[in-house]
Image (tube, rainbow, N blue to C red):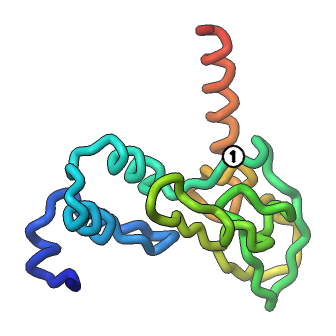
Amino acid sequence: MALSMKHLSSLKNISFIRQNQTCLVAVRHRYFRKGFDPESEVLKEYENQVLGVKGKVYEKKPAKVELKPGKNYHWCSCGYSHSQPLCDGTHKTLADRNWTKVKFKPLVFRVEEEKTYFLCNCKQTKNQPFCDGTHRELEEQDKWKGKKE
């Protein structure tokens, strides 16, 4: 059964995920059809994991990279690529622990001038694929956690 606009408008908490183009409405619909409780911990865990659309922290410092104009670059968004900060296709092998696949896709981008750029390696930046300093916040959180324990 396909989701119509009527179905979409009747569901609460409709959320679309920009980067991996997964629709939580479809996820919720599958859960309802299978008889799962919409407030189940499994669904909440999945939503929390996917809503952020942030990959694994690869490294808490940016990658210094020389980029050239006119070329498409594929920035790794999952954090598992072996050729960081660029994608090597590892995201295709990532699978969610439950019944669905989380599809991280690389961010395709171009630059306008040849120079050195700092690409995000922590995967938490709000200015993908470029570093915005978010890794410093992660380091501060780690320090705070260390003092607390």
- Could you tell me which secondary element the residue under label 1 belongs to? loop
* Quadrant of the rendering where the C terminus is positioned: top right
Q: Position of residue 93 (x, y in %)?
A: 68, 67
Q: Nearer the viewer, residue 58 or 136?
A: 58
- Give the residue at mark 1: 57
- Lateral position of residue 77 relative to residue 86, left or right: left
- The reply, left or right, for residue 118 in relation to residue 40 is right
Q: Is residue 132 visible?
A: no
| Circle 1 crowding by C-alpha within 10 Å: few under 14, some 14–19, many from 20 | some
Is residue 134 in view from this perspective? yes
Please give the name of the residue rendered at 20% of the width and 58% of the height, measured from the top-left corner. Answer: 35
Which residue is pictured at 78% across the width and 45% down the height?
59
Q: Residue 147, image x and y in percent?
A: 65, 9
In the image as oriented, which residue stretches furthest toward the right? 66
Q: Picture coordinates of residue 132 (x, y %)? A: 65, 51
On the picture, is 48 further left or further right than 92? left
Label 1 sits on what residue type?
A: Val
The image quadrant that residue 13 belongs to is bottom left
Q: Residue furthest front?
A: 34
